[in-house]
Structure formats: structure tokens, C-alpha cells
Image (cartoon, rainbow, N blue to C red):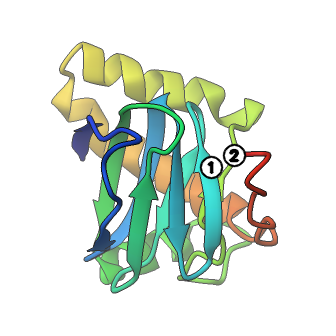
Amino acid sequence: MSDVVCTAGAADRPFEEEHRNFCVAVVTNGTFRYRVRQGTAMLMPGALLLGNPGTCYECGHEHGAGDRCLSFHFGPAYMEQIVADTPGTMKLAFETPRLPPLPALAPLLAEAEAAREMADIAAFEELGLRIAGAAVASGDTPAAQAPSRRDQ
């Protein structure tokens, strides 16, 4: 788990990065644009950023400064086990760039943020597994259409 605090703003030029492993990141503060091969999404608190290993991505802050995420990273073999242990899932790769804020995930995301605030490092392994399981269980939703400039 990484507590990622970004201070980029509208004047900062986005740059390309690469997911080295599977990534499920809980957005806890701020709003930003996330662009990846699977599509473009606007992310806000409560959303889950989804990333596949080897996939390049770009984040942009054209409409506000900074964000904060709890980012969980999983190797392919570990994620394969999470998928195998999650009823009703069969796909290893995420087909959509994000999950929107979902009421069903709110208690789990609140637990993760509370663990961060309390520096409860031991809680993150279980929370990471539960969040990844929720992401793969919900991740079969069709990719959302890229937001229009007006919507952004």
C-alpha cells in the first residue's frame, strides 16, 4: 500500500507513467483525469482507479490542484489468486479505468481511510484484499464513455 499525495495542478503538464503491477487505488481527496488504454475517466473521492501491469497511464489536474489516494499494488500471481477466490469473476485484467463511487463500497473505503489516519499498517493487508476483491467483482461493468470536455 502506498499513500500517494499529488500536488500537481493546472499549470503542470501531465506525463506518462507505467503500472508495474495491478493497481487498485482509492481516491480519498481531489479530482483528476486518468487516461489509460481502457479509456479516460474523471476520478473523485470514493472512486477506484484501476490499472493493469505494463499499461501506460497519464493523470491530469486541469481543473484543480492535487489529490490523495491509497494505492494498493498486486503482482500478477497474487491478483490471479484474488480473482480465483472471488465468486463470479473470471477475468484477470481490468477492462475499465475506474469504478465510480459506489454506496456499497463506502464502508470499506472509510475503513481504509481510518486505517491510514490511525497508521494501522497491519489492517492494510486485509483491506487491500477486500478492496481488490470488490474491484474484480465489480470490474465487469462496461467501460464508461470518456467524459466530454464540458463534463470535465
Residue that lies at the very extreme toward the top in this rendered image: 118
Q: Position of residue 50 (x, y in %)?
A: 51, 62
Q: Which residue is mark 2?
A: 152
Residue type at mark 2: give it: Gln
Residue at position x 38%, y 47% in the image: 128
Residue 102 lies, with reference to residue 57, above or below; the image says above
Q: Is residue 132 left or right of residue 44?
A: left
Q: Is residue 91 left or right of residue 114?
A: right
Do the CB atoms of the residues marked 2 and 1 lie less than 8 Å apart? yes
Marks 2 and 1, the one that precedes in the sequence: 1
Q: Nearer the viewer, residue 67 or 61?
A: 61
Q: Position of residue 41 (x, y in %)?
A: 64, 58
Mark 2 vs mark 1: give the one in front. 2
Q: Residues within 10 Å of mark 1 (few under 14, many from 20)?
A: many
Q: Quadrant of residue 115?
A: top left
Q: Is residue 89 left or right of residue 127?
A: right
Q: Position of residue 57 (x, y in %)?
A: 41, 72
Residue at position x 69%, y 46% in the image: 152
Residue type at mark 1: give it: Met
Q: Is residue 107 left or right of residue 127?
A: right
Q: Nearer the viewer, residue 112 or 151?
A: 151
Q: Which residue is mark 1?
A: 42
